[in-house]
Amino acid sequence: MENAGRHMAEKISERVSLDQHITIVIGGGNNGGDGFVIARCLKEKGYQHHACQLVPDQKIKGDALYHKQVYEQFGGMIERVETLDQLKEKCASSDVVVDAVLGIGITGTIREPLRRMIEVINEAEAVVFSVDIPSGLPANENEVVDMSVNADYTFVVEAPKQSAFVEGLAPYYGEWEVVSIGIPLAAFSDQKQMRWQHMDVQRTFPKRTSFSHKGSHGKGAVVGGQLSMPGSVALTARAALRSGAGLLTVATVKDNIPVVANQCVEAMYHVWRDDQGILIDDSVSSLNHYDAIAIGMGMGRADESQKLTLRIVNEINRPVIVDADGLYHIKSDLEVVRARLAPLVITPHLGEMAMLTETTIAEIKQAPFSITKQFAQKYQVYVVLKGKFTIITTPRGEQVVTDTGNPGLAKGGSGDVLSGVILAFMMQHNERLPAIANACYLHGLTADMSITSGRHTETDLLASDVIDELSVAFRTIV
Ligand SMILES: NC(=O)C1=CN([C@@H]2O[C@H](COP(=O)(O)OP(=O)(O)OC[C@H]3O[C@@H](n4cnc5c(N)ncnc54)[C@H](OP(=O)(O)O)[C@@H]3O)[C@@H](O)[C@H]2O)[C@@H](O)CC1
Ligand SMILES: Nc1ncnc2c1ncn2[C@@H]1O[C@H](COP(=O)(O)OP(=O)(O)O)[C@@H](O)[C@H]1O
Ligand SMILES: [K+]
């Protein structure tokens, strides 16, 4: 608690000048305890502040009581705020409110008087900094917000909670950052560190040995692209090559090959049998010569292509990544997916995930972690649920989130690029989860760096720009 509060006070002092007035609103649990530590540290730094206790004295116990006493011994004055008018007055005379009312220990609907006190905090003009989580907000997905502080900034202790990655709940946090307290998360909490970070990429990214040759980095195949969609496979193939694939073959319909080859001279080509430009069922055994296969991009939804996709999933014992139209094909027979033994990665966006699970986009948005986990475990697949936050789930149910990327990626083709990066990384990494998470992280980071560098804006960034800029993100980790 001492570490948490001290670090948060440090963060607050980086953003608030000494002439600004701060009110710390304090509740009855350990979140309130953090509030007492913050009050003491801000006092030590010379801030004009009020420490307002919103609950009766008997509610302050344990570590929180200890830190309340330390604050008082340090000359701090605690004001007991009981009425809404008292709280309104405090908020009105403050530039900043530090919200240490409720943390992750809330149960049930928010009780009075705290309920209306949260409303008062939200109505105030002051900037609101929440401690660990905006008071009243659930820590996990799939819970309704009864009443919550709407924070401008949140200092989350050690690891962001699930709700920070759920579309309907994340905005309550405002901007957030992690405050490390120097104790492993497992030592004091059942919350897990699920955010895949830059240091995780650096820790896990495989190094190329000086004696490596093209065969060491994987021989991949991209299968897709009906006649009307040559660009999709070109993007996947180019992204895979830029991401270090040793050899890459594009299997597509004959008439697409000159178009794709024009975009991607390093690739090799396999003329796939077609019927009027649609990929049809053919001998798939040749695909067993590759180290990994990505299928589905620009493939179209024809029955013959569906048959082909299901055969690949059924017969190819190499890692397979299924994206886009391929996801519609596997939905027609998920038992084939379940029966498969070799790794299968699926990369749905919200709409495709809703289709696969026969739910709605709204339901997925509300419970993305549990719906994805259920599917991944049931069908023994790796699921990459794409969006502003991308959730990666293993067949065993482990989950990580990447939160890089920006709306510049919300364009046709971005998903094709991601599949190419995943394909390449899967071939160069023995472990599946880090390979996939690194791909998602670096794909998003590339888009972010393209914008922050000023080379692109969210408006003009194209999927092919992301491929060209991958090296900028890669350079941050090698
Ligand atoms: N654990 C650690 O070592 C560390 C923990 N840390 C910090 O502790 C926080 C978690 O603390 P916690 O578990 O004490 O719970 P917390 O969120 O303060 O809530 C309990 C209070 O809320 C009240 N209350 C509950 N439900 C309510 C409702 N519906 N409506 C109204 N009131 C309700 C409940 O009241 P009661 O039910 O007792 O009347 C009680 O007063 C965590 O977020 C982080 O900030 C960090 O310092 C790092 C180390
Ligand atoms: N607002 C956003 N913020 C961050 N990443 C985004 C955003 N919108 C889209 N993306 C990313 O862009 C990619 C889009 O994939 P997808 O929807 O399959 O595109 P497409 O099929 O059109 O190529 C995913 O990796 C997704 O995470
Ligand atoms: K709080």
Image (cartoon, rainbow, N blue to C red):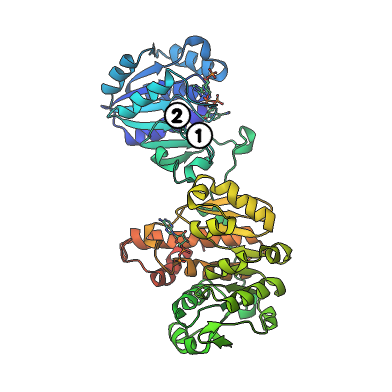
> Which x, y percent locates residue 260?
46, 84
Q: Please state which of the two labelled residues, at mark 1 or mark 2, is closer to the viewer.
A: 1
Question: Mark 1 falls on what kind of element?
Answer: loop
Marks counted in the figure total: 2
Inspect the image, locate mark 2, and give the three-letter code of the amino acid beneath it.
Ser
Q: Is residue 50 visible?
A: yes
Residue depicted at 64% across the width and 34% down the height: 187
Q: Which mark is residue 276?
A: none
Q: Is residue 246 visible?
A: no
Vertically, is 15 above or below 51? below
> Which x, y percent locates residue 339?
73, 64
Inspect the image, locate mark 1, and give the three-letter code of the amino acid beneath it.
Pro
> Which x, y percent locates residue 299?
52, 76
Q: Is mark 2 within 8 Å of ligand 3?
A: yes
Vertically, is 100 above or below 143? above
Left-right relation of 15 to 430: left
Question: Mark 2 falls on what kind of element?
Answer: loop
Q: Which residue is mark 2?
A: 135
Vertically, is 15 above or below 465? above
Residue depicted at 59% across the width and 66% down the height: 207
Q: Which residue is mark 1?
A: 138
> Which x, y percent locates residue 256?
48, 86
Left-right relation of 164 to 356: left
Give whichever of 237, 295 is nearer the camera: 295
